[in-house]
């Protein structure tokens, strides 16, 4: 298995989220693809926290990111928690490094100081529609290129706030070689002189910090979302400005995750509108207290979420759909990533969860069912592991989530308090109480409550008396379950036992009234 890229470097990738809120499911997919690529090529996975935007920092977001990745099984080799030889891995702790590199660009004439105030910038933008701070406008602005040197020094001595802008020269074709999209050529004329550093908070912007960190952390491949593609030409120019063109990483821009319906990329509003999570874990906004649902708390298995996300923008080259993490790693290749956006088919996510639950051993599923029982007020200590294992095994083919086990099997733990009106209308006539009374006598006389033996005796009795099989058995089920649904009837009664089964039939005889 390859452990190097085409230039002979070890494969090293990074996932670099900002702690500005919960991790969006699109970011999770980006992290997953980075992880799969690293593991497939024997490389390293770095988690870098890009917290240079102090105004948008949200308490708890960094812990959330780490917990979400751990839940999904996306392992981190180097990061804030894991440590590593190229730290710190949090950008707010790398100020000295960024200052040094800002100075390198300034000394080389690749960047300049700009003293324009927010009000001055707002005024010029209002006067000049589509204003861009670039080679055609920079000499009309207040910066170290347009001002006399003594004026620049006076401003610095007075403590005036400034930003450092990258000096982009027009007339160049900037080539970005993307491993999914091929070669993309951008005219430098359309690029503005991006801000790289702000004196106000002594922190770099994303553009500078991203390039410096990727270089110093020996990142070989930058795998990120399509929305970052417009930034790639600037990053190419920055690598050149620092003299790092020979060690520039390979760029990989992944397709967008699209809305399940309509146009545009997936958003939280789509999840709220259609009833599915867009975050891996539940998130409580520390400012507003608003709660957003998560895949974990909604009952999804992490293996199912990983499998589902992996196939949104990538395919294994065949018709295989169910793949655990090891299989995904073995099959993953950027060659099979799509250029087109991937529609977020959330119902398919439910199918994956259903499929993984079906493959789970009944005993393991039964353990997961115990907390559900407790949430519904059931003392689960009254039920053995063997009993719960059998119950879950009987109904699990009907569930998409562990929580669904209650809907499908709650009647095992609670006698029906009401009865399905449609079933009553169809299956409960004036003669039904009498026939149910006779059924009770037959049940009391059973030599065994074992499912197969009980079924033979009761079906024989129905045939001998010329009763309608469907009417009797559905009334029987209605009395015991409360509706005409559920697994094999005599499997149900074997688990409930004689006393409980007969008590439920008697209750139905007393309480169910034929529809008028």
Image (cartoon, rainbow, N blue to C red):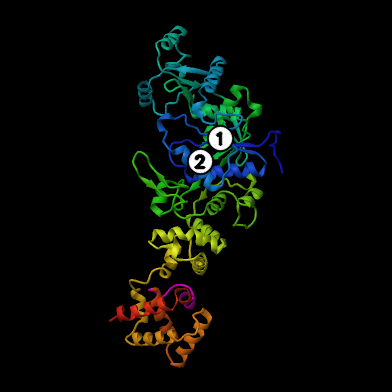
Nearest to the observer: residue 171 or residue 120: 120
| 460 lies above or below 49 | below
Image coordinates for residue 252, horizontal then vertical, percent: 59, 39
Which residue in the protein does label 2 denote? Answer: 66
Location of the C terminus (image quadrant) = bottom left
Instruction: State the CA–CA distance, disc 1 to disc 2.
Output: 10 Å
The residue furthest top is 150
The image quadrant of residue 372 is: bottom left
Secondary structure under tag 1 reads strand
Q: Which residue is mark 1?
A: 79
Camera-nearest residue between 219 and 369 = 369
Residue at 48%, 61% in the rendered image: 400
Crowdedness near tag 2: few (<14), some (14–19) or many (≥20) residues, C-alpha within 10 Å: some
- Say if 100 sits above or below 381 in the image: above
From the viewer's perspective, is 186 left or right of 21? right
Q: Residue at position x 32%, y 86% from top? A: 430
Q: Is residue 483 magenta?
A: yes
Residue 167 in the magenta stretch? The answer is no
Magenta segment boundaries in residue numbering: 482-492
Picture coordinates of residue 305 (x, y %)?
A: 52, 52
Q: Is residue 302 above or below residue 193?
A: below
Tell whether 460 sits left or right of 423.
right
Question: Which of the 4 image quarters holds residue 103?
Answer: top right
Q: Residue furthest left?
A: 516
Q: Do labels 1 and 2 touch, CB within 8 Å?
A: yes
């Amino acid at each position: 298995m390859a452990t190097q890229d085409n230039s002979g470097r070890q494969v090293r990738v990074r996932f670099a989220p900002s702690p500005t809120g919960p991790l969006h499911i699109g970011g999770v997919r980006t992290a997953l693809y980075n992880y799969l690529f690293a593991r497939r090529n024997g490389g390293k996975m770095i988690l870098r926290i890009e917290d240079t935007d102090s105004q948008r920092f949200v308490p708890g977001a960094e812990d959330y990111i780490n917990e979400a990745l751990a839940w999904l099984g996306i392992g981190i080799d180097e990061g804030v928690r894991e440590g590593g030889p190229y730290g710190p891995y949090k950008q707010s702790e790398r100020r000295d490094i960024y200052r040094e590199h800002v100075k390198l660009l300034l000394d080389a004439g690749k960047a300049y100081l700009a003293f324009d105030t927010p009000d001055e910038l707002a005024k010029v933008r209002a006067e000049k529609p589509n204003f861009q701070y670039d080679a055609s406008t920079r000499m009309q602005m207040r910066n170290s290129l347009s001002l006399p040197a003594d004026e620049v020094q006076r401003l610095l001595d007075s403590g005036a706030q400034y930003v450092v802008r990258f000096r982009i020269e027009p007339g160049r074709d900037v080539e970005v070689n993307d491993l999914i999209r091929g070669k993309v050529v951008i005219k430098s004329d359309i690029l503005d002189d991006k801000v790289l550093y702000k004196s106000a908070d002594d922190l770099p912007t994303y553009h500078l910090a991203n390039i410096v960190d990727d270089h110093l952390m020996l990142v070989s491949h930058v795998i990120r979302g399509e929305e970052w593609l417009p930034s790639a030409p600037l990053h190419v120019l920055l690598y050149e400005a620092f003299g790092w063109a020979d060690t520039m990483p390979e760029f990989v821009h992944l397709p967008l995750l699209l809305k399940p319906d309509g146009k545009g990329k997936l958003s939280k509003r789509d999840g709220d509108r259609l009833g599915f999570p867009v975050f891996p874990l539940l998130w409580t906004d520390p400012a507003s207290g608003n709660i957003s649902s998560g895949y974990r708390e909604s009952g999804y298995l992490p293996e199912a979420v990983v499998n589902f996300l992996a196939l949104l923008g990538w395919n294994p080259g065949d018709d295989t759909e169910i793949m655990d993490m090891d299989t995904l790693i073995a099959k993953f290749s950027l060659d099979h990533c799509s250029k087109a956006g991937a529609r977020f088919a959330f119902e398919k996510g439910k199918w994956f969860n259903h499929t993984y639950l079906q493959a789970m051993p009944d005993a393991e599923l039964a353990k997961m069912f115990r907390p559900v029982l407790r949430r519904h007020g059931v003392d689960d200590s009254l039920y053995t592991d063997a009993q719960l294992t059998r119950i879950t095994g009987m109904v699990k083919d009907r569930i998409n989530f562990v929580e669904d086990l209650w809907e499908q099997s709650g009647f095992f733990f609670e006698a029906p308090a009401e009865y399905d009106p449609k079933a009553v209308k169809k299956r409960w006539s004036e003669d039904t109480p009498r026939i149910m009374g006779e059924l009770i006598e037959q049940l009391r006389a059973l030599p065994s409550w074992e499912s197969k033996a009980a079924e033979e005796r009761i079906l024989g009795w129905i045939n001998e008396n010329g009763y309608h099989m469907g009417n009797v058995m559905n009334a029987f089920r209605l009395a015991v379950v409360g509706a005409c649904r559920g697994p094999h009837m005599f499997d149900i009664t074997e688990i409930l036992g004689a006393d409980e089964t007969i008590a439920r039939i008697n209750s139905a005889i007393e309480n169910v009234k034929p529809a008028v």
